[in-house]
Amino acid sequence: MYTQKELQEAKRQIDSTLHKLHETVRTLEAKEDSRRYRSQLTLARRRIEAFTIAVRLIERELAEKNQE
């Protein structure tokens, strides 16, 4: 399926995106009228959840590859 190197790189890229999304959420929440950014906050939080799931699946796949 995917090599260990490909999975590690995918995880690295997702981790980077997650970091940026967390920063985005913090920035938007700190705005004076954060309610104005409700849709952007919702989208960012949903993406964080989706990418977190992806990272967990990649980690599980990497753990299985290490057991082989």
Image (tube, helix red, strand yellow):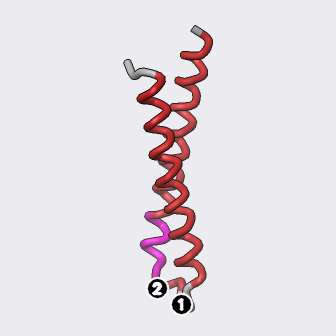
Q: Which mark is residue 33?
A: 1
Q: What secondary structure is the stretch in magenta mostly built from? A: helix
Mark number displayed over residue 36: 2
Looking at the image, residue 37 lies above or below residue 67 = below
- Looking at the rendered structure, the kind of residue marked 1 is Asp
Q: Is residue 46 left or right of residue 2?
A: right
- Residue at screen point 53% across, 39% down: 55
The range drawn in magenta is 36-43
> Is 23 placed above or below 8 here?
below
Please provide percent x and percent y for residue 50. Answer: 48, 48
Circle 2 SS class? helix
Cα distance between the residues tagged 2 and 1? 6 Å
Q: Position of residue 52 (x, y in %)?
A: 55, 46
Q: Are marks 2 and 1 in contact (CB under 8 Å)?
A: yes
Nearest to the observer: residue 68 or residue 38: 68
Is 58 covered by the magenta stretch? no
Vertical placement of 29 versus 55: above or below? below
Compared across the picture, whether 62 is left or right of 39 comes to right
- What quarter of the picture does the N terminus occupy? top left
User: Who's the residue at 57% across and 31% down the image?
Assistant: 59
Instruction: Return the x and y of residue 14 as percentages of the image width and height.
Output: 47, 46
